[in-house]
Image (spheres, helix red, strand yellow):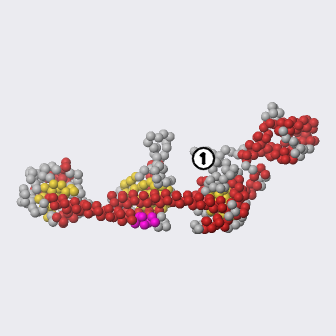
Amino acid sequence: MPPTLQTVVRRMNFRPLAGTSGGGVLDAAVRWVAVSELADPTPYLEGGELLLTTGMRMEGDLRHYVGRLVARGVAGLGFGVGVSHEETPPALVEAAEEAGLPLFEVPRETPFIAVGKAVSELLAAEQYEEVTRAFAAQGRLTRAALRPEGMHAVIDRLAKEVGGWAALLEESGEVRHATRGARTEAVAAELARRRGRPVPGRTGGAERPPDSLALSAPGEHTVIQPLGGGGRPRGFFAVGAGHAFSPVTHTVINAAGSLLTLAMEQGRTQLAAERRLRTAVLELLLSGEEDRARTVLGALGGRLPDGPLIVLAAPPEALEALEPVAFTAAPGGPHSGPHSGSGEEPVVALVAEPEAEEVAAAAEGPVGLSQPCGYDGLRNALDQASRALESGGGGVVRFGELAGQGLLGLLDQATVRAFSAALLAPLTGYGSRADLVRSLRAYLDSNGHWDAAAQRLGVHRHTLRYRMRRVAELLGRDLDDPGVRAELWLALEAAQRPSPASPPDSSR
C-alpha cells in the first residue's frame, strides 16, 4: 500500500491550507511526486500524484486549474513559497477549499527533490514490507501443508491470510473442504457454466477447462484457480473476501495454489504406490505366503481381514469407492485371467464374511461375491467372484446363486457359445436338413433309446437310425461314447440359450 497523504505531510512538515477538513481526505494514497509549472499539467499525470508547483504561470481564475487537478485525481497540491510568490495566492486557497483539493504550503527551505526522495523511500519501504508479509504468509502456508490434514490445512490457513473464506473442490465442482462462510454454490455454478463453453478452434462442442478467473460483486471478491499440471484440471480452489485483493494477497493465493497442486500430485503418486503394494501383497497370498503378506502390509499400517473370507469382484471404476472400506487390489493385478469380458480386469476386494454385504453396497454398482473361503482357497474364490461379476446379472451376484443354475451357469458364456457353434456347424450347414439337429437332441434326451426318440420325433426308428449315422459321419464322432454325448448335449443346451443383451457403449 503506498504511503498516505497524511504520512507525507507529517514527514515533510507541510502546512495545510485548504481541502483537508473532509473525512478520510488525508488517507488518500500518494503514488508519486510530480513537479510542474504548466498551466495545465493534467496531460502528464496519471492520478494519485502529489503535485508540486511554485505558481510561476498561475494567473486569472484558478478554479479551472484546480478543477482539472481534481478531475484528474491528484492526491494533493503542494505550493512552494519564496520563489515566485512569497505566500500562497488567496485565490488558489479559495478554489482548493471549494473543490475539496488538499492544498499545502511547502517552505522555501524544502527542495522539491527532497519531497520526491522522501516519497520514494516510503514506497520502497512499503514494497519491502509487502514482500516480507508475502514471504511470511508463504511460510505459514508451507507449514500448514506439512500438517497431517495436508490440503485441508492449506485451505484453512489461506482463509485466515486473506481475511475471508477458502474452498477446495473436485474437478466436477463437488466440495471437498470449505471454511465457514464459503460461497461454494456460486463457485460450483460458475465452474459448471464455464465448463460448457467450447474450446476455440475445436468443433463438436468439446468442453473448455475453466481457467483462473476473478469475480467481483458488491461486497464480494472471489478468485478461482485450477489445480494440477497442464491439460485438464484435477480440481479447483476458490478464495473470497469482502474487500478487493492486494498484490500481496494475490501472491499468497498463487503460493497456496502451488502448494495445493504439489500436494495433489504427491497424493496421486502415493496412492499409485499403495495400489502397487496391495497388488504385490495379493501376489504373495496367491503364492501361499500369507505370513509374509501380513508382514509387508503391517509394516505400512495395514492389515488383512480374518477368515473366513469373501472375495468381491467389481468393475474398475469401483476402485476408489472400495479402497476406504476393504483391502482392495487395483485392476491389472495378478488376478488377471480369461474371465474379463470388458477387456479391463476387475477390482478385487478381500473382506471378512460378516462385512461382505456392507462392502458390496459401497461399490454402488455390479459386484460378484465368492463363496466363503480361507486364504488357502483364495485363488479359487477369485475365480468365483470374477465369474459371478461376468454373469451379467447386475447388482450383487453371489457365486452360490450362480452355481444353482447348473453346469452351464458356471462356464464362460461367450466361450460356450463359440464351442457350440463350431461343434454343431456340420449339422446346421447340412443343406436344408435342419432335422439332424432336432433328431440329435431327441436321441440324447431319450438316453439313446431308439423307440422313445423316434416316438418323440414322430418318425420310424429306422429313419432315426439313418439320421444318427449321418450325424456321426458329419461330426466325425462316435455317438456311443459317453464323453461325446456329454459334449454334444452341452453344445445343444448352449445353442438354445438366448445371447445376453449387448452392454451399453461406455465410450458415450
Answer yes or no: is residue 310 visible: no
Q: Say few, some or many: other residues with alpha carbon within 10 Å of mark 1 (under 14 / 14 to 19 / 20 or more).
A: few
Q: Between residues 40 and 400, which one lies in front from this camera angle?
A: 400
* Magenta-drawn segment: 140-146
Q: Quick one: quadrant of the N terminus? A: bottom left
| Tag 1 residue | 506
Magenta span main SS: helix
Residue 434 in the image: state x and y as whole percent: 82, 35
Q: Secondary structure at mark 1?
A: loop
Q: Between residues 135 and 18, which one lies in front from this camera angle?
A: 135
Q: Between residues 260 and 334, which one lies in front from this camera angle?
A: 334
Q: Residue at x 20, y 51 (%)?
A: 45
Name the kind of residue labelled 1 in the image: Ser
Q: Quadrant of residue 320?
A: bottom right
Q: Residue at x 59, y 58 (%)?
A: 276
Magenta stretch holds residue 257: no
Residue 494 in the image: state x and y as whole percent: 77, 45
Residue 69 in the image: state x and y as whole percent: 18, 53
Q: Residue at x 14, y 58 (%)?
A: 112
Q: Residue at x 10, y 63 (%)?
A: 109
Q: Quadrant of residue 110?
A: bottom left
Answer yes or no: is residue 317 visible: yes
